Amino acid sequence: MVPNTIGSETNIKLPFSFIIFSLIALVLSQILLLINGQMLVDGSFRIPAIWSAAHLLVLGWALMVAMGAMYQLVPVASLTKIWNEKFGFVQFFITAIGIMFFSWMLYVSPQNASIPGILMLFGILMFLFQMFMTLRKQAKPNILTAFVGSALVCLLLTIFLGIALIYSLQTGFAAQFYQAIFKSHLLMGLTGWFTLLIFGFSYKMAPMFSLSHGFPMIHARYVYGIYMSGLVITLISFFSDNSYLLKAGFFLLFAGFSIFTWHVSIIINKRLKKKLDHSFSYALGAIGLGNLIHLAAFIALWTDHFSILIGPLVYLYLLLWIVLSIMGYLFKIVPFLWWTYKYSKEMGKKAVPALKDVMNEKVVVPFFSVFVIAVLAVFLSIIFKNILFFNIGQFILSIVFVAIALTILGVLKK
Amino acid sequence: MNIKEKVIEALRSVYDPELNINVVDLGLIYHVDVTEENDVNVTMTLTTPGCPLHDSITTGVRYAVQGIEETKNVDVNLVWEPAWSPEKMSPEGLRLLGR
């Protein structure tokens, strides 16, 4: 028997700071999208207001949630303490101020966004350094380390590609590669950083929330190898402008994602917990949706409408795969954080509530179902250029986002 | 009821908050040893090595045993081998999971 008495819990205030900030950014991003709906419907994705809303959503909400979750999950998953908690709080304040200032500058004066961009970059680099120092202490790296480590590298590349975009816009530097840099920025940010991170943590959380046992893990190696190959080949295709490589890259991304979907279904079929929580079920559903969007993107490549479809498909990928997964897991992570803060020290002394009693699970099915329908409405309105449909869909989506944010914050009253 | 039985009974009040099943029915308790001086040594595991509730559950086990009047020093020894498996669960634990 090998004793293990490593204590690895993080000061709960650290992940919570990230998550509360992220909920505010989420609400702000929705307000911005709502008041700039007309331009989005006209196909004007590359305008300051959309840049600002997209970065508030992707950096202010999704990235900050991911950072907060990683401050909690990386130490427990790797059985090591976070390298330096005080450094983590400083990193939070720098990144939060950087993101808010950056998003504001993108809206009012995008050519000057590089100044807050540097502050934000510094905050994210501090986070990467923190994670590097924490992961290097891990006694036995595993496939989860590979997914999370690669996701962090993709995050770093996304930031540098973003900085290159702003620099190119300001000075005309590498203007001939502007499109390739822009596509690479999206690829590394969405399919690199977020997808690899969700893959990695799903391998930890899916068995945990379903109490699965006795499932194989060999598939994860194929998922990692094939998906990473897809990322690299797609990246090369952008700079070489080679359509065959692009098709090969998209196919590998789809294949890697499909194996991941298959593997998670194997894990879930091996579960002991018969009835899964609703929010976790939606996070699992997001995997199927992400897989379908990868397939749709690959099929669209063979049509003449790829340039029209790819924007709405990226929107769909962000909302129905990344955002839905994060929201599903957030409904599990936030009660856990709050429960740990409030009841952890009471356990064994008196009766404490279960995690499911901390979050209002009843709202999950209506909120998440309306969310999916509203996203599909917005997606179709962009394709068919219907402003009324867009406004209705986006309005409902914004309301649902705010309702979800308030439900999550409601945990703090339990 | 001897001290060992009292310890096991006390451990039934410690729940895995995610599954809402107590640590005894979940099969997490491997051994309870009580010395002549009434020092208690609990050897236990968790369902997965990277369990985020790691510290909470082991601390809960310690507090529950310390709450028994006759016990003196309490030691909780967390082990990963032999690994937890569903066979270690009680019929009641399986029933609560819907099995």
Image (spheres, rainbow, N blue to C red):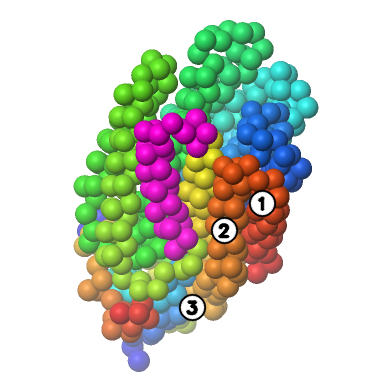
Quadrant where the N terminus of chain A is found in the figure: bottom left
Q: Chain of mark 1?
A: A
Q: Chain of mark 2?
A: A
Q: Secondary structure at mark 3?
A: loop
Residue closer to the observer: A142 or A8: A142
Same chain, labels 2 and 1: yes
Q: Secondary structure at mark 1?
A: helix
- Tell me whether circle 3 and circle 2 mark residues in contact (CB < 8 Å): no
User: Could you say which disc has been placed on residue A389 in the image?
Assistant: 1
- Mark 2 is surrounded, within 10 Å at the Cα level, by few (under 14), some (14 to 19) or many (20 or more) other residues, namely some
Q: Which residue is mark 3?
A: B67
- Mark 1 is surrounded, within 10 Å at the Cα level, by few (under 14), some (14 to 19) or many (20 or more) other residues, namely some
User: Could you say which disc has been placed on residue A373 in the image?
Assistant: 2
x, y percentage for residue A145? 35, 40
Badge nearest the viewer, 2 or 1: 1
Which residue occupies 34% across, 40% down? A254
Q: Chain of mark 3?
A: B
| Count of residue discs | 3
